[in-house]
Image (cartoon, helix red, strand yellow):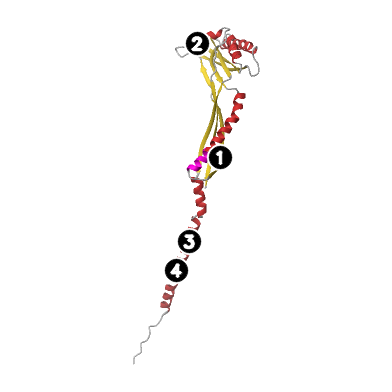
Amino acid sequence: MLRRTPPAITPRCVNRRLGHRLARHATMAGGACLLGAGLSFAHAQVPPAGAALAAEGIREHNVSFSASASLELPQDTLTITLQATREGNDAAQVQSSLKQVLEAALAEARKAVQADALELRSGNFNLSPRYGNNGRANGWVGSTDLQLSGRDIGRVAATAGRIQGMVITSTGYSLSRELREKHEQELIGQAVQAWRRRAAEIARQFGYAGYVLGEVQVHTSEGETVRPMPMMRVAAAMDSAPLPTEAGKGSVSATVQGSVRLTR
């Protein structure tokens, strides 16, 4: 009976089989490493669910709005601006002439100065070249301003009428600081209450139980009436007659602007 002799296992075959096994184990180990690395990466990139919801809630539930309160009051302060204009060939002479006119006007107005009733303020003093039709400088022209302001309307108007050598270029009525500050605090309180009512109503309309206060700003403002007067219409004010005036009404307002975060 013949016996089959098994094939001889040479060192080369052993090395080859061992190499296949090692390669297979290396592949499995590498896959496990890659799988582990992938899980770790996914875990590092995905934020916690609570943090994502919190960020979304902050972003979506903030509301910004404003509320205002206003009041009309009789304007109690009159401001009149007077101006003198001179021109000539010599700059020094023009400047000297304007200086004389302004000093005379100040001397006359100072007689009526009284705290809160009438105050003086000198304005702009300008001197510039004068140009002819050919575009060349042929002299100098200058101007100076004087401003009268006060709560005694009659005193301010009468003083403006007595000043010689200057014309009235504008009149303006406004609210005095004392009258404005007297009502501003009341208006701020009204605006704040209106803002809080609106915040509660907005929360209710969106289906929320309440709100948390965010950043808030409070502003106040005043409306002012200014009436420019053409030169030809103020010539009558150059005599000693008081300037006819009539005060209007000014408005004081307070505005509250801010944001809230709606809460369940």
> Looking at the image, is mark 2 or mark 3 earlier in the sequence?
3
Name the quadrant containing residue 186: top right
Q: Where is residue 170 drawn, in percent x and y?
A: 53, 16
Q: Which residue is mark 3?
A: 39
Q: Amino acid at mark 4?
A: Met
Residue mark closest to the camera, 4 vs 2: 2
**Marks 3 and 4, how far apart at CA:** 17 Å
Q: Where is residue 231 drawn, in percent x and y?
A: 50, 12
Q: Which residue is mark 4?
A: 28
Q: Which residue is mark 2?
A: 233
Of 245 and 148, nearer the camera is 245
Q: Secondary structure at mark 2?
A: helix
**Marks 1 and 2, how far apart at CA:** 52 Å
Q: Amino acid at mark 3?
A: Leu
Q: Secondary structure at mark 3?
A: helix
Of 33 and 184, nearer the camera is 184
Extreme residue toward the left, this view = 1
Q: Where is residue 140 drawn, in percent x and y?
A: 53, 12
Mark 1 nearby-residue class (10 Å; few <14, some 14–19, many ≥20): few
Q: Secondary structure at mark 1?
A: strand
Residue 229 vertical position relative to residue 182 in the rendered view, above or below: above
> Looking at the image, is mark 4 or mark 2 earlier in the sequence?
4
Instruction: Report the residue at 50% width, 51% height from top.
Output: 53
In the image, the segment drawn in magenta is 198-205
**Marks 1 and 3, how far apart at CA:** 42 Å
Q: Which residue is mark 1?
A: 215
**Marks 4 and 2, how far apart at CA:** 103 Å
Residue mark closest to the camera, 1 vs 3: 1
Instruction: Report the residue at 43% width, 71% height from top.
Output: 24
